[in-house]
Image (cartoon, grey):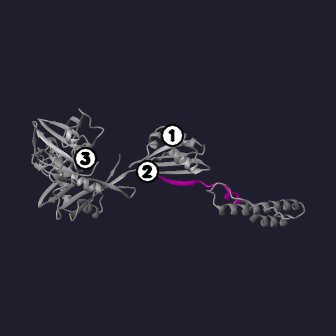
Amino acid sequence: MQQNDPPATPTPSAPANSAWPRWRYWVAVTLAAAAVAASSLLAVNTYRDNRLSHETASQQAATVAPALQLADAAVSVLQPLESAVEIVIHRNDTLDNIFRRLRISVEDLSTVRSLPGVRQSLDFLRPGDVVKLTSLNGELTSLQRRVSDTATVLVKRAASGEFAADIIKNSLEVRTSRLHGEITSSLFKTINDLGASDQVALQLAEVFRYDIDFAQELQPGDTFTIVLEKVWRDGKFLRDGEITAAEFVNNGKAYRAVRYILPDGHHEYYTPAGQSIRRAFLRAPVDFSRISSGFGLRWHPILNRLRAHQGIDYAAPVGTPVHAAGDGRISFRGLQGGYGNVLAIEHGSGVETVYGHLSGFASSAGIGRHVRQGDIIGFVGMTGLATGPHLHYEYRIGGIHRNPASVKSMPAEPLTASLRHDFETKATELLANLSGIKTAVSPKHN
């Protein structure tokens, strides 16, 4: 006959909450036991106090004091601690599912979202945003989220249990620095080697895109110098800002530009003489692409015969943004034979530009809509008769095809006489920065 095992002696177990550290639990049990012993000893001493002298009672109290201190420590350890966590927002994250995942009261979240001016600051989360949360016993005690470069929303629970929200203003510091580089392989690599971001390379190409085709004409040995704003917050570098002045030497020819902020708040780039850098039409409607077929007669790769090519083909990956070459009105959008998806823009004075083989159209590029130069109107594709992804671009005057590369584009309107003095004063300082390091620091509030 098999003998039954003796019943196991029950042992205390840690709380089910996984957030409770095991060592804290056992310390609490030990101190609690000491507290019980201290209480018993105190009861005995109280009973004996009637029979002991005052001096003896004082000695006993001194003996009990350490035990009472252990009891206080046990109570302190057993009290729950406030927990704090930083959450980096990922795609499809919401505060509701974050609160549920952390087992924080969603009722508290609902209360916070009902506070004036808070809901819009919390509902729109972007990947990479950081939300800081503190909680106690599953109840929210504070929430913090930066809503812009200069503003942070902070929600705190008061002792009464009610929530209050504040918007904390963070000032930005703008510093300017001078960067000089020489092209070795690509504009992006040279800019990155100088410690600046790809966005700075794109800015530089945009400043001089009317004079230099950065996809076709850039070559090793070209040099540039730029004065760049760098944005700092709370003593930490935040991001690269705007180019305020630049010089680019391409194939031995120097081009210079300075930024000037116009009265309506938007900025343009001008030559040192005050002429606008901007032209009526872009050199190329696709950034950093290569010409795969020029204007004129060519052997058609699909039709296998000699045929006039009445535009320029720019090879680029599918999905590359296509920009409006100039201001105008969209006159056609749809399928057109071998050109596939086509969009046409009328610019006035009989000028029309055409964009073919698109993979799709921008949602804002509807027929009859007005567009500004540089607006995204579609995306590179290979619809229609195309052997590879590219943009077919045409320039027509009065219905007659012209070579886009040889069309002389007129500059935009120059500065008005009333702004000339202000421009010259500011341009002198900016141009001085191009020839030497000069740092300026200024606070910026949004």
Dot 3: what SS? loop
Residue 36 at x, y percent in the picture = 78, 60
Of tags 2 and 1, the one toward the viewer is 2
Question: Count of labels shown?
Answer: 3
Q: Is residue 393 left or right of residue 233?
A: left
Q: In this view, does 289 lie to the left or right of 81?
A: left
Residue 129: mark: 2
Residue type, label 1: Arg
Return the disc, 1 or 3, that comes first in the chain's sequence: 1
The residue that disc 3 covers is 382
Return the disc, 2 or 1, that comes first in the chain's sequence: 1
Distance from label 3 to label 2 (Cα)? 37 Å
The residue that disc 1 covers is 113
Instruction: Determine the residue positioned at 52% across, 44% down.
Output: 96
Dot 1: what SS? helix
Residue type, label 3: Met
Q: In this view, does 138 lie to the left or right of 224?
A: right
Instruction: Determine the residue positioned at 48% across, 47% down.
Output: 154
Magenta-drawn segment: 74-90
Return the disc, 3 or 2, that comes first in the chain's sequence: 2
